Image (tube, grey):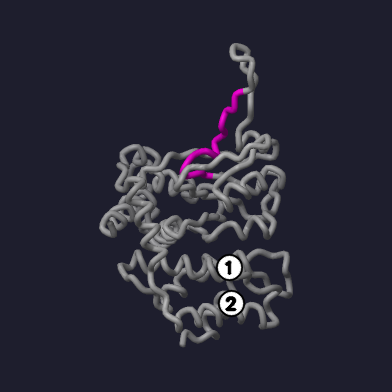
Amino acid sequence: MRSQLDACLDAVNQVLLGKEGQVRLALTCLLARGHLLIEDLPGMGKTTLSHALARVLGLSFQRIQFTSDLLPGDILGTSVFDRDSGQFVFHPGPIFAELILADEINRATPKSQSALLEAMEEGQVTIEGATRPLPDPFFVIATQNPANQGGTFALPESQLDRFLMRLSLGYPARAAEKALLMGRARRDMLPQLEPLLDHAALAAIQDEVERVRVSDALADYVLRLVEATRSQPQFAWGLSPRGSLALLGAARAWAYLAERDYVIPEDVQAVLPAVVGHRLRERSDPTELGGGTLVQWLLREVPPL
C-alpha cells in the first residue's frame, strides 16, 4: 500500500508543481485523521491541491465558498416541507462529503465558521435536534486569506485548534512557474487523475499509522517540546494535551510515508512547524498568528535526546 501512496504523491505533484513538501504534509494530515488549514494569497493552488487529493484518493468532494452572508444551514443542510407527503424532508448540505474544501473560511461570520466545529471534532452534525453521522473518511481542507486583507473574520483559537496542521503553499520556484506557464492548464489536468486508493485501503493505512511505534525516548522528546512552550517566557501560552497528541500523530504518519514502522526525532521535527505554528503566540503580541520564530527556537534549543 505504500507504493500506492507514492503513486498518489507523484500524481498530485504532476498537477501542483514545485510543492512536494506541502503535498506530503497534506497527505500526512489526512493519514493522521486530521484537518488541514492553508493560509495563502489567492491563486496559489489551494483549490487545485484539494481537487487533486480528492481524485487520487477516490473521495467524494464538495467545495463550500465562505462569504459574509453564508448561513449555517447552507453548510449543514435544512428541512423542507414536502407537499406530497405532508412532512418535512431533510436535504443534506455540502458538509456530507468525504473531502470538504472550506474556501476562504475567514470571510464568513463566526456563526457560520462554528458550523464546522462539531463536524471536525466529532465526525457528526446536529441539525434540528437530530444527530447525523458524516462520511468516513471525513477530511476538511480550509483555506484562508491573510488576516490583514479586508473583509476577514479571524478564526478563534478554539477553531484553529481543530486543525491538525496549518501550512502555506507560497510562490513557486522559477523553474516550476515556467513549466506552469508553458504547460497545460492545471484545472484541465484534474479530470484525468484516476483514483489510486479505495476506501478500504485508505482506512487500513490510517489504522496502520496509529500502530507506528513510539519509544519512551521519543515520547520524552515530545514532552520536552511541549513543556518548553509552557515554561519559557516568550510563549503567550503553552501547547495543550491535544497539541501534543497532534504532534505525535502527525509524526507517526510522516514516519509511515517514509516507510518506517517507528518514529524518529526527525519525523517530529519535520511536522513541528505545521502542527504547532498556529497553536503558539508570542507573549509580546498574543493576537498575532505566526509561531515561526517560536518554532525555530524549539527546534534549536530543545535537544532530541
Q: Which of marks 1 and 2 is nearer the N terminus?
A: 2
Circle 2 — which element? Answer: helix
Q: Which amino acid does label 1 sit on?
A: Gly
Q: Can residue 89 be seen in this view?
A: yes
Measured as percent of width and height from the top left, residue 66 is found at 62, 41
Measured as percent of width and height from the top left, residue 264 is found at 40, 77
Q: Which residue: 61% across, 51% down?
A: 145
In front here: 186 or 144? 144
Label tally: 2
Residue 226 image label: 2
In front here: 60 or 64? 60
Height in image: 112 above or below 223?
A: above
Q: Does the magenta stretch include residue 94?
A: yes
What are the residue bounds of the magenta stretch? 89-101
Q: Can residue 70 be seen in this view?
A: no
In front here: 59 or 154? 59
Q: Which residue: 69% across, 65% down?
A: 288
Give the CA separation, mark 1 to mark 2.
8 Å
Q: Which amino acid does label 2 sit on?
A: Val
In front here: 260 or 149? 260
Check if mark 1's residue and mark 2's residue have beta carbons within 8 Å: yes
Q: Residue beneath label 1, please?
A: 243
Height in image: 37 above or below 127?
A: below
Q: How crowded is mark 2: few (under 14 residues within 10 Å), some or many (20 or more)?
A: many
Residue 99 image label: none
Q: Which residue: 45% across, 84% down?
A: 217
Height in image: 106 above or below 85?
A: below
The quarter in which the N terminus is drawn is bottom left
Circle 1 — which element? Answer: helix
Q: How crowded is mark 1: few (under 14 residues within 10 Å), some or many (20 or more)?
A: some
Where, by quadrant of the figure, is residue 226 drawn?
A: bottom right
